[in-house]
Image (tube, rainbow, N blue to C red):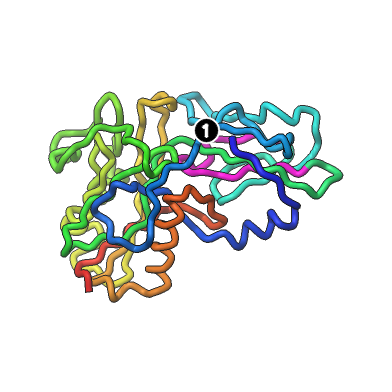
Amino acid sequence: MKSTLCTFASCLLILFVIPACNKADKTDPDAVDTGNESGNETNLTNTTSTQCPNAPSYGDSILYLQPVKGNYTVEPVNNKGVQGTYLSWPEGLDINATTGLINITQSETGIRYNVAFVKKGTTDTCISTLILGGVSYIDSIYVLSKNDTLAAPIFNANPNASPVCDGSDDTDYPDNGNHNGNNKCQFDDDTTSQGANAQKLRVRTVSGIINLKKSLDDGLLGKNPRNGHFKKVKIEYRLNDNSKKADQKITVQVMYYDKVSSIPNDLKQDVASKRKNAFTYKIIAEKPRPPLLIIAGLAN
């Protein structure tokens, strides 16, 4: 778990000036190139800083939700009997400011966080990096005229990691008789009207890949979507990894524009920044959820 040291004031400043990012799949061929991305994988292992002994440690660099009744929580393995204040960023981590207890059930999984501790009587903030294992999608612009149609999930906030799930094709939807994924992964096992596929977000149950063109054609955004029209849809899933098939969920936001040039420049720049930051494993100060998937009909 990587740890660093800063003053309390400077760490608060970090919360407001670090640019936003989401984790993305480096190998995703379906997204328009919106930024200069680095494919170099950084060291994600647990490390210790001798300069900051109070940096919060939870025993591992990746924590996984577990299939338990009620809430699954973890607490720091260090700082026993040491008084102080815990804080975290970006938004999404449910952490007790006094004890450092993290409620993983109530947190957003699939995200990399900074967790900090300010020892009582000091202004120094000890920071460590922590990942909550799970699924995310890259913020991207998908151009249908270039056959950019598929949004693939990434796992454990690592855009270059191998997929946890098997691949699948357009036969892998609930209305084709597939409801349960396979032994590795299960996406959208909700057969009610609130399920992702029931709302026309075409999520493959084995791979978690979203077919955005099919979603649009099937009416996710209505018959005649307007520029800027969007919809947020929750995807429920289970992974046969260290989370032991615990019930998890992620909400994605799908937005439509008739062509790339119709997308506001500030929105394109935001997507480009998030994609660039994703591949350098940067932690963001802003809210990383829901990931934004923009469908553009034409390239110009």
**Amino acid type, label 1:** Thr
In this picture, residue 139 sits left or right of residue 167:
right
Q: Is residue 231 above or below residue 202?
A: below
SS under mark 1 = loop
Residue 113's image quarter?
Answer: top right
In this picture, residue 90 sits left or right of residue 175:
right
Q: Residue at x 58, y 30 (%)?
A: 73
Image position, residue 268 (x, y; %): 37, 68
Q: Residue at x 47, y 40 (%)?
A: 109
Image position, residue 170 (x, y; %): 14, 43
Sort mark 1 into few (<14), some (14-19) or many (20+) by Cα contacts within 10 Å: few
Residue 195 among magenta residues:
no
Name the outermost residue toward the front.
Answer: 40
Numbered disc total = 1
Which quarter shows the C terminus?
bottom left
Tell me which segment is drawn in magenta: 99-118
Residue 30 in sight in this render: yes
Q: Is residue 19 above or below residue 87?
A: below
Q: Residue at x 29, y 39 (%)?
A: 188
In this picture, residue 258 sits left or right of residue 89:
left
Front residue (pair 252, 134): 134
Residue 106 among magenta residues:
yes
Image position, residue 186 (x, y; %): 30, 32
Residue 241's image quarter?
Answer: top left
Q: Is residue 240 above or below residue 203?
A: above
Front residue (pair 207, 221): 207
Image position, residue 221 (x, y; %): 25, 61
Q: Residue at x 52, y 38 (%)?
A: 131
Residue 200 in sight in this render: no
- Per the image, the residue denoted by label 1 is 45
